Image: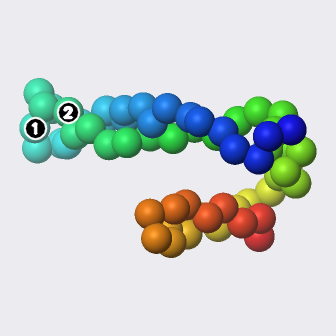
Amino acid sequence: MSNSRKIKISKKYRYNKSNLDIPVISPKLLLQGEWLKQAGFSSTNTVSVEIFNKMLVITVN
């Protein structure tokens, strides 16, 4: 199993109550797959996500 994955950042659209005509666009990242299980994550875990030097660090609580 590779320790590295390339995942595309997608867009999340949401609408502000004060202006429903113009969406606010935010980056969205979806992590899923068997490789998460192999890395020690399960569907019952909660995680902490920290930002460190332009990296996301995800730790099982």
In the displayed structure image, the side of residue 5 where residue 29 appears, left or right: left
Question: Residue 23 shows which numbered tag?
Answer: 2
Q: CA distance from mark 2 to mark 1?
A: 8 Å
Residue holding disc 1: 19
Q: Quadrant of residue 14?
A: top left
Q: Residues within 10 Å of mark 1 (few under 14, many from 20)?
A: few
Q: Residue furthest top?
A: 21
Nearest the viewer among 43 and 2 is: 2
User: Is 27 above or below relative to 33?
Assistant: below
Q: Residue at x 69, y 44 (%)?
A: 4
Q: Residues within 10 Å of mark 2 (few under 14, many from 20)?
A: few
Relative image position of residue 40 (x, y in whole percent) = 88, 54
In the displayed structure image, the side of residue 32 where residue 39 appears, left or right: right
Relative image position of residue 20 (x, y in whole percent) = 15, 32
Identity of the amino acid at label 1? Asn
**Would you say residue 43 is visible in this rendering?**
no
Nearest the viewer among 54 and 14 is: 54
Identity of the amino acid at label 2? Pro
User: Is 60 above or below relative to 5?
Assistant: below
Split into 4 quadrants, where in the image is the N terminus?
Answer: top right
**Would you say residue 21 is visible in this rendering?**
yes
Nearest the viewer among 10 and 15 is: 10
Relative image position of residue 61 (x, y in whole percent) = 77, 70
Mark 2 or 1: in front is 2
In the displayed structure image, the side of residue 38 where residue 10 appears, left or right: left
